[in-house]
Image (spheres, rainbow, N blue to C red):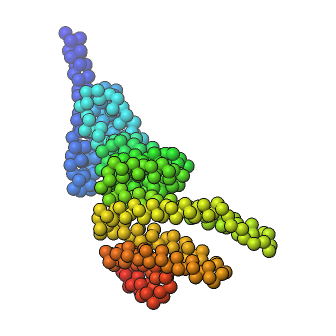
Amino acid sequence: MKIKVLMAALLGVITINAFAQKGELSSAQTEYEKYDQLSRANYVLAKPSLISAKTSIDKASANAKTATLPQTYALKAAIYASIAYKDTVQTTSVTEIAASQEALSKAKETDTKKEYTKLIQHASLELAQIQLDKGVKAYQNKKFDEAYGAFDAAQKIIPDDTTAMLYTGISAANAKNYPAAISNYNKLLTTNYKDKAKIYADMPTIYLLNKDTAGAVKIISEAVTKYPTNGDLRKEEIEVSLQAGQQNDLVSKIEAAVKADPNNKTLYYYAGLTYSQVAEALQKDIDKLQKADAKAAKAKSGSKPVANPQIAKLEQTRIENFTKAAGAYKKAVEIDHNYFEAILNLGYVSMAPAIDAYNAARFLNDQKAYDAEMKKVTAQFDAAKPFLLKAVELNPQSVDALTNLKSYYLGIRDTDNANATQKKIDALPKKQ
């Protein structure tokens, strides 16, 4: 009889102890829910509940019967994440973050029934926000390596968050960690991020900085395919292709697009832009050769300059590309008579060969030859005049249009109109 009474008493003690620990878990849950509700309005009022929740969860974590329960892990992760988020002392917050991360890992592993998903998500977001805040602060202080580390840590916690991906990519690029920037931007392109066109616009530059020209060409081609009406991307494709020495491929691509859609004024505009950019790129090659020739002539004192056939060939190719550009812009203007961008550029490419000829004529020593050449130059300038005037008519506030017109007046040696046009430029509102 005494043994039965003793056993009953012992069982009672065991039950009470187990219940007591379950009670700590329940208390931790209740106090944390109270804190979570109050903290949105007043952290000072909510703080005592967070402290109580910590006390209870520490006791539950220390007891063998509740230490390994999914609920214990999930609550500890959430509670410690909230404490760390509010802790401004780095030495203690680091310990709290580590405790939360460890508990979070265990919670994900043991919560096979997904009963504590909300707590796990809450803890994840708190921990991620801590890292995001660190990253923003570091970025603002131009500590880009540190910012990248923090944003990358946040992304590991919330791998599908597009903001974390974006910030990680931006900070990596600024830290000159180009492979990491490329990786994060590419990852972002696979998500539902709403402004992918801007991401595409940044990526070719990063590829080029990473000395991956092929990657730059590939990504901008992909961008134009996905956003065919995006003018900025089209322009960037032209620039990248020229840097990569792939102007022939670019011209073929543009011509094929025009052939497929012959009534698309924008495609003609980009065809013109492509040809004119090729012409501008050729001038850089011409300048290099001219400098080399001048240096060589200087080294041979008393020697006369010798015409360089390579320069002559490049100059001819430059003129041919300006002519093709003018033809493409004219097609665009035929479709839209008030297409300002096409008319503006048409004026420029029509006048560019005249400017080249004008500059070359200044070095002629024979007056008769000079006069004959300047007569041709004036005729070339006059051929561009209608487009130059039309561009100013369409947009009298355009610095580019007025500058082109001023160049025309200087080319035909009309100083009065050149000065009058400059006054119009000076009177324009200054851009902030």
**Picture coordinates of residue 304, whole percent (x, y):** 75, 72
Is 285 or 104 nearer to us in this picture? 285
Which quarter of the figure has residue 4?
top left
| Residue drawn where x is 37% and y is 78% of the image | 389
| Residue drawn where x is 78% and y is 69% of the image | 299
Does residue 83 lie above or below 371 as drawn? above
Is 10 or 37 nearer to us in this picture? 37
| Residue drawn where x is 33% and y is 32% of the image | 108
User: Visible in this render: residue 431?
Assistant: no
User: Visible in this render: residue 302?
Assistant: yes
**Picture coordinates of residue 95, whole percent (x, y):** 43, 44
Horizontal side of 281 relative to 13 (left or right) equals right
**Picture coordinates of residue 376, whole percent (x, y):** 52, 76
**Picture coordinates of residue 173, whole percent (x, y):** 48, 53
Which quarter of the figure has residue 70?
top left
Is 119 or 60 nearer to us in this picture? 119
Q: Quadrant of the C terminus?
A: bottom left
